Image: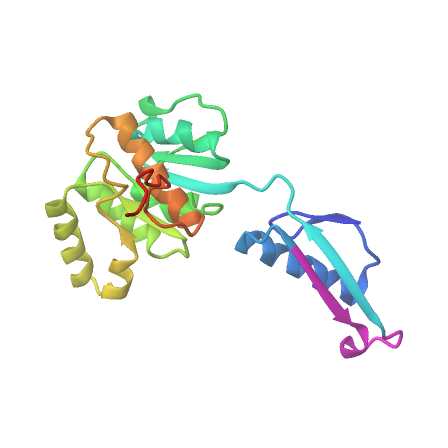
Amino acid sequence: MIAVLADGTTMGTVGGGASEHHIIKKAVESMASGESVFTFEIDHAEKGMICGGRMEVFGNIIGNHTGLCIFGGGHIAQSLAKIATLTGFFVTVVEDRPELEKDFEKVKYIVCKPEEYEKVDPLAYADYTVICTRGHSTDYEALRYCLTKKLKYIGMIGSTPKVTELFGKLRTDGVTEETLESIYAPIGLDIASAIPSEIAVAILAEILLIKNNGKPKHKKFSLVAEA
């Protein structure tokens, strides 16, 4: 039995050699893709091993948390950070104002400025990201940074005029229409509320919808019999 960490380091062994190398590679790939269980076979003869034969391997991701990175530490971000941990997310909050750092369980705070993003790499373990900083310029810097990474979800808070303005600036910077189409902005499901905590719920609902390949519809069915 072998334990493989996300960075490829290991504990234990399954015999070493080409087979173990292939298993480690597959395990790291599975963690990146979110595949919770994987099986595959290795043909030793194809690897140039005299022993030949085939080897079946079973793997399981243990303690896997999906990463959510929130740029901004205001009221909506604070609510979102707390409720996201309840659904299994490991949350990172990125903020340039140290006074907004909170002591929330399972939430990591990174205090840094936009020009430090590449050095700090807050998206190292994130699959989903929400941008809700203190202003348009910092939202734009966070969005530009997020677009350089491979993420499953990029959402940005803001009014339609704000989103239109920032998207126009991105077009000027050479960002394609296909990339702009992948950004969820304005963010969240429409729940007709301006309360920060309720907006946070709407944002998380949209993220879970994308994460679980769902569709925005009610489960409610009609009790009225068809005529």
Residue at 32% in and 24% down: 100
Residue 176 visible, this orientation = no
Relative vertical location of residue 168 with respect to residue 44 in this rendering, above or below: above
Asked if 109 appears above or below 99 in the picture, the reply is below
Residue at the spot 27% in from the left edge and 65% down from the top edge: 178
Q: In this view, does 147 lie above or below 161?
A: below
Look at the picture and state if 26 lies above or below 204.
below
| Viewer-nearest residue: 222 or 163 | 222
Name, please, the residue furthest toward the front. 227
In front here: 156 or 7? 156
Q: In this view, does 158 lie to the left or right of 83?
A: left
Foreground pick, 56 / 148 = 56
Can residue 90 be seen at all in this image of the molecule?
yes
Can you tell which quarter of the image residue 56 is in? bottom right
Residue lying furthest left in this view? 161
Q: Residue at x 16, y 62 (%)?
A: 172
Q: Residue 78's image quarter? A: top left
Q: Position of residue 218 (x, y in %)?
A: 33, 42
41 drawn magenta: yes
Per the image, is 164 magenta? no
Residue 176: name its quadrant. bottom left
Give, as a single range, the part of the protein colored magenta: 38-52
Q: Where is residue 24 in the image (x, y as percent from the top left)?
A: 69, 57
